[in-house]
Amino acid sequence: MRWVLTSISKKYRFKYIKRGVSGLPCVIFEFVQKRYGNESSFILNGDKSIEAVKTWTNELFSKKGVADFSFPEEVYEWFLKVVFEVYEKAENDLEKRMIMVKIIHTREVMIAGVDITSAEKNYKWNDFQVRTVCLLHDIGRFEQALLGSYSDVKTNFDHALAGAEMIKKHDFSEFAALGIDKNSVVESVRCHSAYSYPGEDVYAKLIRDADKLALLRCMPEILAVKVEEYPTTGVTEAALRAYKAGRMVRNEDINTKADLFLAWLGWQSDLNFSQTAKILDKEGIKKWMEEELALLGVEI
């Protein structure tokens, strides 16, 4: 394991993460690789005491995969503080499962962000800012879990705006020394889930792609742990029209499982980096979603 930043004072500590697929690969429809491994079983049936989940979280961010990447320890410690202050308030199994799913999702977004930036060679990335934006992009989601849904529409809770405000108010002492632009981090988090992003911040564009890639890579497992339930019959006409017109499906038009798959497929129209699209094709994710829609009786 290599210390990648040697010129900064020893007071700056870094958390090292091993990235990659957890557990043994499992093929779904012969082309989608299972990424959560045994984590889905733990979320459904494991020990959900706060100490057990803290241990599980630290293992997720330290022992999985084959390649190392780093981010400021201060950022990681604040992330944990926010997550487990909320987890202590969780009143039922659903809320706890929702929080645990979002913890894994955050790990997967960090992996996706590294995958994209490693392949996109035309940009001069600040690796610490990449990891920070990825780690904090959904920091507002954890409080939202206590409302019983991750739908901003259903909960009337803008998780991206809430997360951006939390970051804006917190003093991160390491940012200046590491060249991390706090305003860029705030903008990236605030805009990561917006319907569109007309701005020019490359990290805001990155997190939008990394979030989508991470979600699509893990959708089989996310569906398996049942944090959101949708009818398995029918399709919303507005969702189908949007997809066929090459537009993203709006959140308010997602009412059935078929609508979800149309929304996910529609994300292709909003990708900012060519490498993201290449990964989706290479890993068979697009084909899996098309197959799922066919099983639901929806022709596209």
Image (tube, grey):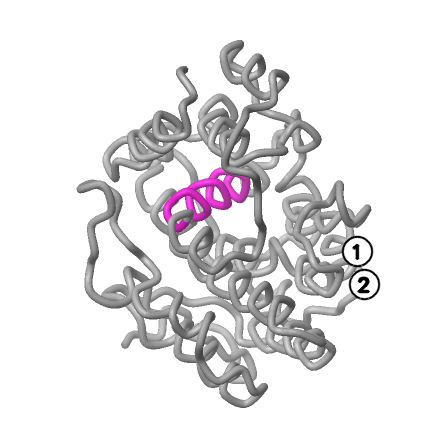
Quadrant position of the C terminus in the picture: top left
Does 217 appear in magenta? yes
Check the image and report above or below for 34 versus 273. below
For badge 2, the amino acid type reads: Lys
Q: Main secondary structure of the magenta part?
A: helix
Name the residue at the bottom extreme: 51
Q: Which residue is mark 1?
A: 165
Does 99 appear in magenta? no
The residue depicted at 26 percent of the width and 64 percent of the height is 67
Q: Which residue is mark 2?
A: 169
Nearer the observer: mark 1 or 2; the answer is 1
Which stretch appears magenta? 206-218
Answer with the quarter of the image where residue 187 lies.
top right
Instruction: Using residue 10 as the reference point, say whether residue 16 is left or right of it.
Output: left
Q: Nearer the viewer, residue 234 or 115?
A: 234
The residue depicted at 75 percent of the width and 41 percent of the height is 153
